[in-house]
Image: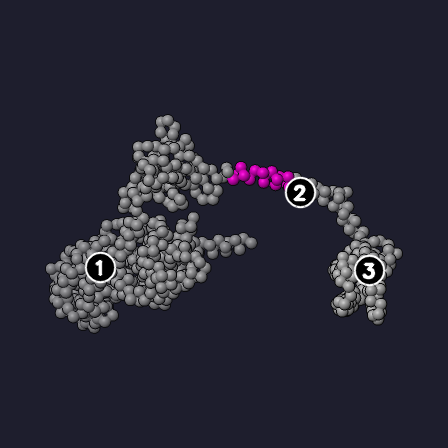
Amino acid sequence: MITTIENIGKAFLSKILPLRGTLQFATRVFLNIFDRRTYNSASRMVFIHQFYFTSVQILPLFLFVAVIFGSLINGMAFQVVKNLGLSDYLGRLLMGFVVTELSPFVTVLLIALRSSSAINAEIAVMKVSRELNTLESFRIDLIHYLFIPRILNGMLSMVLLTSLFALVVLSIGLLVSSLVFGTSVDAYIDTLLHSADVLDIVILLIKCAAFGFFITLIPIRLGLNASQELTSIPVAVLNGMVKVFLAIVTIEALSSILRFI
Amino acid sequence: MEGFLADHKSHLGLVSLEVPLISNLPVWSNIALIRQYHENMPWEEAKTLALDLLRRFGVAATAEKRNPSLTAEERFCIMLIRAAMVRDAVVVLDRPFRIFPDLPDGRFFMDSLRKVDDLIAEAHFFDYNWEKERYGATDDAEN
Amino acid sequence: MTQRIEFKVGLFITITSFLIMASIGYVAYKKGMFSKVYTYTLSSHTGENLTEGMPVAVWGFTIGRVSSLELNDQGTVLIRIKIPERHIRMIRADSKFVLDKPLIGSPRILVKTTNLNGLPLSPLTIPELTESNDINEIIKRAQPIIDKADRIMANIEGITANLADPKGDVNRILRDAEALVARFSKRDSLLEMVVGDPESVKSIHESLKKLRDITARADGILQRVDGMAVKADGILQRVDGMAGKTDEELYGRDGVLPQFRNILRDLLAKLAKIDATFDNINKISTEAADSTKDLKALRNELDETIQTIRDLADEIERMIPFKTKPEIKLP
């Protein structure tokens, strides 16, 4: 009996301790964001390169996905709304679901699949090949030079790409709306405006930033867990991606609670 | 050696296999990084400086290359230039024959150090006792 | 390379940021965040149910919000509401401000303006905020229902007590039901169980048998009456053939034809009654007594008809002695 309770306690602690470590690491990184020394020429260059790889390079694919998703979602939403005679709820559906839920979700999935995995592997490789030692020996702070540019890039990319996704989807919505309902541009915009809530937009932006923060911080943290062996790289990436997925679900749930309370 | 490194940490320019070049940065960026980070030097200026130094060593062609595609000689030169980028650098060459093992003696290292003489404050070799003769040293060297 | 990347990144950030800012700015502009806002002050004797940010609505549309609440030296609550310029037309000097507390949802201030062309409300005027309390209204309306529910509850309590009492009505009914079931399992038929006497059942069975006979006979009557109608047609034709007879005898007040018509009318009425009686016969299992009564009446009426027709036949025979005796079969 006592052994069982001990095992339960051990299992709980083994799960909770890494989480505590991650949260401590997150706090440290977050506080360093406001450190002036972070913003030097080297960090800026890393940020620009990271942003280029995360947001600009992906742009054609991202826009393509946004157009496809936008057409599908709008088509389905408009048909359902039309069939059920719920045209009055069109604005709420578009603003409440497509903009505030779907856009960040699709964006975070794309960024996580592409950039989080890359960051995870990159940090793990740097750890295995002792490149992190190089930076430390030259007194280059890992958080300032390596982590914060990546995390800021994640946050900014999430916000910008989500907004872009939402704009594309809403633009397609305008097109579908005029084709299905014969709605004018003004009427469509009025419908959206009526359902747009500044608080929802603020929560959306905070959610995007939180997504961006954690989907880059977790791969960095898990990448640092790699040992000196090459075989530890895939393990680190695998663990990192699983944790990224859990973080996405957690943030999504928390933001929903925040919105609907 | 650890004690020495700790004492000179603020100006330390280490040349060692333990501190390899960053593989996802081009050569010029590996060199420019030090000034960019510590002195907030704009990347264009830092790049120019790096290219100048690469030219001194005759390896300017490697500027856009990455670590895995470098020869041992090129790698050593770039590591040395990077160490020299530290302001008032105390350059420490940690077992340089491990970086460039094909050399018969240490003259190449001395020649290389002379090329960045204007940038460095001190230079120290740390190697095994049995390598003493390759440096042409007669007295006891630090291990 | 780096320069090209910097340019692309810069371009992307600029364009996307511009699009986002433009969108948010447009929403903010349309939501009236940049328009001039007028502040009015209302007074209330209580600050209960009033909160900052509470909506101010006209005809269900939110036109403004409560910006601040303040308690002055006289113990009056001052409520400052902010109304954007584009909704200012709704706030007139004669506007009434009502604190609406719906049963479901948050309270809000309703503006009731009867004349939109009236004088505008001066920002220096402090109208009073009256109160409309949906909850109390509903409670007042619900009071009789609650009283009734109380009575129902008391009754239910009584029933429950009765149910629990071994000597109570419910238990007695259950005991009786048990006895009934026992009887049901012993007796030969449901009918015997109901009447409780085998002799009565036998008697009812015999009555039903008789009733079936009566039905068969009634069918026969109907057939004969039909035959009678056919014969009556024949009589009519013969009567027509008597055109050579005196008009007075044929068409006079007491002539043959008027009498004959009367008989036919009577006959039709009887036929209608026979139909009704047959309907009753169909329902005989439930209204056996009534139906039997109807059959007796029918028998009497049919006897009368037969007699009348006989009289008619005699009359015709008397009037037309040279004719052969008409064949009128009677039941």
Amino acid type shown at disc 2: Ile
> In this view of the protein, which residue sits in the foreground, C213 or C329?
C329
* Chain identifier of the residue bearing label 3 in the image: C
Tag 3–tag 1 contact (CB < 8 Å): no
Based on the displayed image, in which of its 4 quarters is residue A158 positioned?
bottom left
Q: Residue furthest right?
A: C199
Kindly report which numbered mark, 1 or 2, lies closer to the viewer in this rendering. Answer: 2
- Give me the C-alpha separation between circle 2 and circle 3: 69 Å
Residue A181 in sight in this render = yes
Q: Quadrant of the N terminus of chain B?
A: bottom left
Question: Horizontal placement of A41 versus C187: left or right?
Answer: left
Q: Is residue C147 magenta?
A: yes
Question: Does label 2 lie on the same chain as label 1?
Answer: yes
Residue A138 in sight in this render = no
Please report the bounds of the magenta region as a residue range: C138-153
Identify the residue position indicated by label 2 in the image.
Answer: C156
Q: Quadrant of the C terminus of chain B?
A: bottom left
Amino acid type shown at disc 3: Thr
Question: Horizontal placement of C187 versus A49: left or right?
Answer: right
- Give me the C-alpha separation between circle 3 and circle 1: 122 Å
Q: Residues within 10 Å of mark 3 (few under 14, many from 20)?
A: some
Task: Pinpoint residue C87: horizontal percent, then vertical percent.
Answer: 32, 43
Labels 2 and 3: the sequence-earlier one: 2
Labels 1 and 2: the sequence-earlier one: 1
Question: Horizontal placement of A124 versus C245: left or right?
Answer: left
Identify the residue position indicated by label 3 in the image.
Answer: C308
